[in-house]
Image: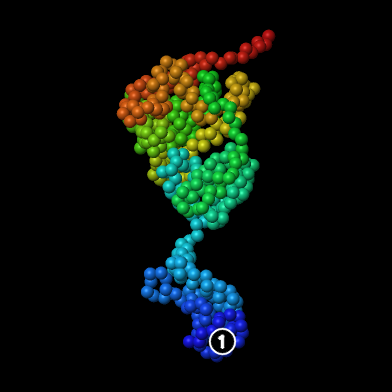
Amino acid sequence: MPVVHLDDNFAKRVTRPEKGHVEYFDDKIGNYIVRVYADRIVGTLRAHPLGSTKKKRFPLGEYPTITMAEMRRKAETVRGRFRDGTDPAAEREAIREKRRQEEKTPPLDFDRLCDLYIARLPDLKLSWEQDRGYINRDCRPAWGKRLAASITTADGATRLLEIAKRAPVAANRVRSASMKLFGWAVEQGLLDFNPMAGTKKPTKERKDGVDRTLSDAEFVVLWRAIEAATLAPGLRAALQVLALTGQRANEIAGLALSELRHLDDPSQALAEIPSERMKGRRRHVVPLAASVIGIINKEIARQKAEAKIEGRAMGNHVFTSRFLDRERIARHSLSQALRRIIPALDPTGEDGEIVRRLQADPPTPHAYRRTCASGMARLGIPREDRKAVLAHREDDVLGDHYDSYDRLREKRIALEAWARHCDALLSGEKNTGAVVPIRAVQS
């Protein structure tokens, strides 16, 4: 095999064979070989990787695609790496294999990332249905088919501003939900960075009213407004049960038929909410007063009648939506209902002063929880029993690990007392303390 100096002068003067190829060795760089064809010159470096008995070939490129000088420099670099103990040929093959695998695996677009995340979401967050709704409604339509890794901080910020134009507070919730989605993807090694981490909340939310409770008069006016409003029956019933039990909105909204016990016996009736649906991740038992049983039984009967008429099986939840194939109502539906009902009240009517207070400082569904807690205190219910009703546990070793008594008897006494108080207010048996305007008598 001829030994020559493989440079650009060689390429210009070498005789090209009409068929096949001729090999030439370089005179300086050992194992640097070129094959001369009629239309090209192909460079290769053959070398023993450290510890190997077999030679490997490393392609250096083709002339005239690259110059012979470039091919020579590449041969020197590769030979140096072989001598240092690395294996450029193996690295190159690993890259090729990775590309082959990537071609077999569909690219991770945003839709696929959402599918992976939402499948895990129930294990990651208690209020996972809300996050799923925000992702499916506000993120997927914009980014669905885009590669997840191509979404930038600027894309996220722009999307939040678009949402904020129509729903300012919802934009903040979308930011939170998508922040968790991308953060999970980074933790799982699916993405390199979280594009939402650099965004800001697009809306400054109102902080006043965080301790809002309803007076007796406000409780009655709002209850009657809920009864009169055009609402899905399940939504109306859920708001009423929320008011009478003081539980968290999501716990009531997601109440399942399988969680109900002894509805035929008011002295034993209860809801047993499993730990995975509780904020504190501890099972919670809620005794049900007679008025609450009545609301629940009425809602179950309505659902059974509808299911029979439509020739389908009844759903699994107590309070169902008109949408989403009659699945459970969403927690945010309770908030949206109050935001529709309260502004629509007449501030000039007989209850005008109370309505104006409600409109000036509109309560959220959580206000019912604070109202129940405050109301039970006024009724003389001990603090320990009120905390038990609200599923607030003691923050000590005894409460965390040893005291398993659920105070069922005490909770039943407390919630029945609160339900009787509410029933008396709504029936007019008990005075709400509202100021009744004196009307002039016409002569």
Q: Position of 264 compared to 43: left or right?
A: left
Whether 198 is drawn above or below 90: the answer is: above
The extreme front residue here reads: 28
Residue pictured at 56% horizontal, 46% vertical: 196
Residue 162, image x, y percentages: 63, 45
Q: Can you give x and y, in whole percent of width and height, for residue 403 in the image?
A: 32, 27
Q: Amino acid at mark 1?
A: Ala
Judge whether 369 appears above or below 256 on screen: above
Residue 302 appears in view: no
Q: Residues within 10 Å of mark 1 (few under 14, many from 20)?
A: few
Visual colour scheme? rainbow
Residue 186 visible in image: yes
Determine the secondary structure under disc 1: loop
Is 412 situated above or below 16?
above
x then y, percent, for residue 347:
63, 24
Q: Please give left or right for residue 77 compared with residue 272 in the image.
A: right
- Give residue 229's position: percent from left, percent from top: 55, 31
What's the residue at 49%, 34% (across, down)? 235
Closer to the camera, 296 or 244? 244
Seen as rendered, the residue at the extreme right is: 443
- Residue at 53% from the left image edge and 48% from the top image edge: 194
Mark count: 1
- Residue furthest bottom as drawn: 18
Q: Nearer the viewer, residue 428 or 140?
A: 140
Residue 248 is drawn in which quadrant? top left
Q: Nearer the viewer, residue 419 or 376?
A: 376
Figure quadrant of the C terminus: top right
Quickly name the residue at label 1: 38
